[in-house]
Image (cartoon, rainbow, N blue to C red):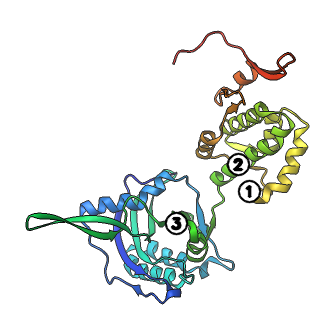
Amino acid sequence: MINVYNAQIESLSIHRVGNKARNEGIFLSQSPLVISDELNSLLKEYFLKSFREKEENYYQFVHETDLEFHDLYNTCSEIFNDPRTVHENSKKIAQLLFNEGKHPHIKNGELYVVYFENMLLDNEKVDAVGIFKSELKHDFLQFEEKSENLEAILQQGVNLNKLDKGAIIFNKNKEEGYKVLSIDSNRYDTKYWLEQFLGVDVFADENFYTKKYLKFCQDFAKDVVLPAEDKQQEVMFMNRAVNHFAKNDNFQENNFLNEVMENPDLIPEFQNYKTEKAPKYKIEDLTEFPVSNTAVTSARKKIKSVINLDTNMQIKLDFINPESAEKFIEKGWDEEKQMYYYLVYFNKEEKN
């Protein structure tokens, strides 16, 4: 989990990178940008806002042979070893990005290379290298007094409310390829940014495993539990699954199945579904791992606990107290109306 509140910009270099395929050039600034306190604050918000709002999906630098052949990994390592080299290494980063601009759809733009201090990653203070690119230019009006009139002048510039592309490389887990976060608002060329330039793959830690396993469970509930039983049991299965993760520091699949799978006939179905679908979630051989509370909290917010009925009614089940939904709601069939019904027990109505 990251906290960027106290992060400080220690160095900022800006270059312009064109599209190599269209014979556009590259412009390298000869010195870092000197910025005022006001601009520093605005740029920090521009660079980091998207990362605060986005779910944390970590990556790591990878190379098919060895990390020692990964150019961007080596450049970031040089910066972390000696932060005084940030600007000269920022030129190398600009050249690496320029070399990957081989597709005519890739937009030119400004490249910002930032050295941050006082980042908090998992409650540990670390330095970081930020690599950001602005691509889209937006129209805006400037006004100028001329004689007795106020004239409007149309100009173009970068919208500081939206970052086009960005990556933060944290000085942590160097041997595994560092921990990297990435943003790409213009997803038409994701392969160019993530694979060709950054050269990263997912960072498989407890956050990744917890999130992927819960997503797998959610799809199992929809594809298997719902057709085999009903919507109530689909919701209750995910209810039990999330609560199992929430109360355990370590996940063990056998314990999970014994506690969560109320219908033992579905256990073979679960195993078959995992065999078929696991590669999609990258959990093929995953049967035990540490649980990430952050990932559980995030999953709980996303999983719907509502039964929608075709009579324009909704029944919301409680994820915090799953026993209530199991003890105090029953499903039945009314012969006279030829309709299903839910019977809900309660002592009194709670006031809002």
The percent position of residue 315, horizontal first and vertical second, equals 67, 26
Amino acid type at mark 2: Lys
Q: How many marks?
A: 3
Q: Quadrant of residue 255?
A: top right
Q: Amino acid at mark 3?
A: Asn
Apparent side of residue 116 relative to residue 183 in the rendered image (left or right): left
- How many C-alpha atoms fall within 10 Å of the one at disc 2: few (<14), some, or many (≥20)? some
C-alpha gap between disc 3 and disc 1? 24 Å
Q: Is 157 in front, or is 264?
A: 157
In the rendered image, which residue does mark 2 sit on? Answer: 215
Q: Element type at marker 3?
A: loop
Disc 1 vs disc 2: Cβ atoms closer than 8 Å? yes
Q: CA distance from mark 2 to mark 3?
A: 25 Å
Quarter of the rendering containing residue 119:
bottom left
In the rendered structure, are the residues bearing label 2 and label 3 in contact, judged by CB atoms less than 8 Å apart?
no
From the viewer's perspective, tell me whether residue 239 is left or right of residue 333.
Answer: left
- Give the mark nearer the N terminus: 2 vs 3: 3
Pick whichever, 294 or 290, lies toward us: 294
Q: Secondary structure at mark 2?
A: helix
Residue indicated by mark 3:
186
What is the distance, in whole Å, between disc 1 and disc 2 at their CAs? 8 Å
